[in-house]
Amino acid sequence: MNHVWGDEARRLTDEVTVLVGTSNGGYPSGNSLVIQGSAETVIIDPSVDVVAKGGAGVPVDAVINSHGHEDHMAGNGFFSDVRLHIHEADLVAAQSLDGLMEIYGFEGQEEVDARQTFVEEFHFTDRPDAQGFSDGHQFDLGGITVEAVHLPGHTRGHSGFRIPGVFFLSDIDLTGFGPYYGDVWSDLDDFEASLHQVRDEEAEFYVTFHQKGIIEGRETFVEMLDKYLSVIDRRHNTMLEFLAEPRSIDDLVQHRFMYREHIPASFADRAEKRCAELHAARMLSRGEVETTDDGRLVAC
């Protein structure tokens, strides 16, 4: 890596380097992964910092997006002359801004604002040439392979990547906030299943795109993953307690089960609504709540 990245380029193995973003990859930045084989070099999730610093520090032959969110695709336009790969379920998000809007489910002024932000702050560039991959696809870079592991829930196509010695978790970020499933393409059951699936991954290093960054050792990873997974049950049980008396979905949204009160409603309400809807559906399927005559929910 060249001098532009300096100490922010953390080499994990001879082939794998993490380009650590601002604030350890805190949003809007992220921790991008560079894998160098004897035949090709790829970058996974080129962040806004990759664009700001003028690249990855080495020539790149292909870009891989872990999923279709703006912060993971910030460098797609910067690397416009190389191949772009993303899981087939999220392919539309890389191909056009209209496709990215589908994943979020924005409406009205929120959509107008998001479009402007994604272009101006995240450099979003339509990539109609993007190619879809599926679970288990192997990118052969020459002497090293990158294997896609489909881990849906955050988005339909969200994927991790298995590389010798390293597992890239993308937005399974292991933060205290817990799993984010607040978009129309998010799914609670899928996310929970993906967390159980990824628990079996064996690696020396686990890398999250945001905040936690580089995690050394399976024991530490499993401990962090279990705490992260427990947030789902904590949210669910807290919602269920709140439904001791009849409440509407709007009541759940206003109470805030994902975001703290200081987060603006213009940002939080859509995600809170999707979260509440998913947990309400789970409660109904388990017989934990019933619907009142006026359409509210109440614990059984």
Image (cartoon, rainbow, N blue to C red):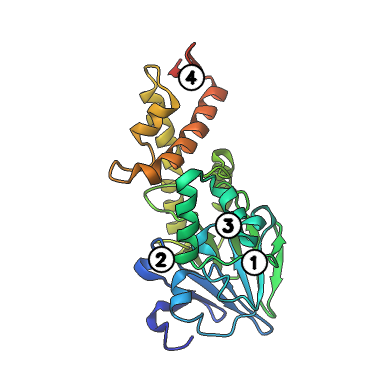
- Report how far apart the C-alphas of labels 4 and 1 lie in the structure: 45 Å
Give the percent coordinates (x, y) of residue 265.
35, 41
Question: Badges 2 and 3: C-beta atoms under 8 Å apart?
Answer: no
Question: Badges 1 and 2: C-beta atoms under 8 Å apart?
Answer: no
Q: Nearer the viewer, mark 3 or mark 1?
A: 1
Which residue carries the number 3 mark?
Answer: 68
Return the disc, 2 or 3, that comes first in the chain's sequence.
2
Secondary structure state at the residue bearing disc 3: loop
Identify residue type, mark 2: Gly
Which residue carries the number 2 mark?
Answer: 25
Return the disc, 4 or 2, that comes first in the chain's sequence.
2
Which residue carries the number 1 mark?
Answer: 127
Secondary structure state at the residue bearing disc 1: loop
Q: Nearer the viewer, mark 1 or mark 2?
A: 1
Q: Is residue 182 visible?
A: no
Q: Nearer the viewer, residue 123 or 82?
A: 123
Return the disc, 4 or 1, that comes first in the chain's sequence.
1
Q: Could you tell me which residue is drawn at 50 percent across and 64 percent down? A: 119
Residue 63 in the figure: left or right of residue 27: right
Give the percent coordinates (x, y) of residue 229.
46, 44
Packing grade of label 1 (10 A; few <14, some 14-19, many >=20) is some
Identify residue type, mark 4: Val
Return the disc, 3 or 1, that comes first in the chain's sequence.
3
Question: Badges 3 and 4: C-beta atoms under 8 Å apart?
Answer: no
- Report how far apart the C-alphas of labels 1 and 2 lie in the structure: 24 Å
Q: Nearer the viewer, residue 226 or 101?
A: 101
- Report how far apart the C-alphas of labels 2 and 3 lie in the structure: 17 Å
Q: Please give the count of numbered marks on the rendered protein.
A: 4
- Report how far apart the C-alphas of labels 3 and 1 lie in the structure: 12 Å
Which residue carries the number 4 mark?
Answer: 289
Return the disc, 3 or 4, that comes first in the chain's sequence.
3
Identify residue type, mark 1: Arg
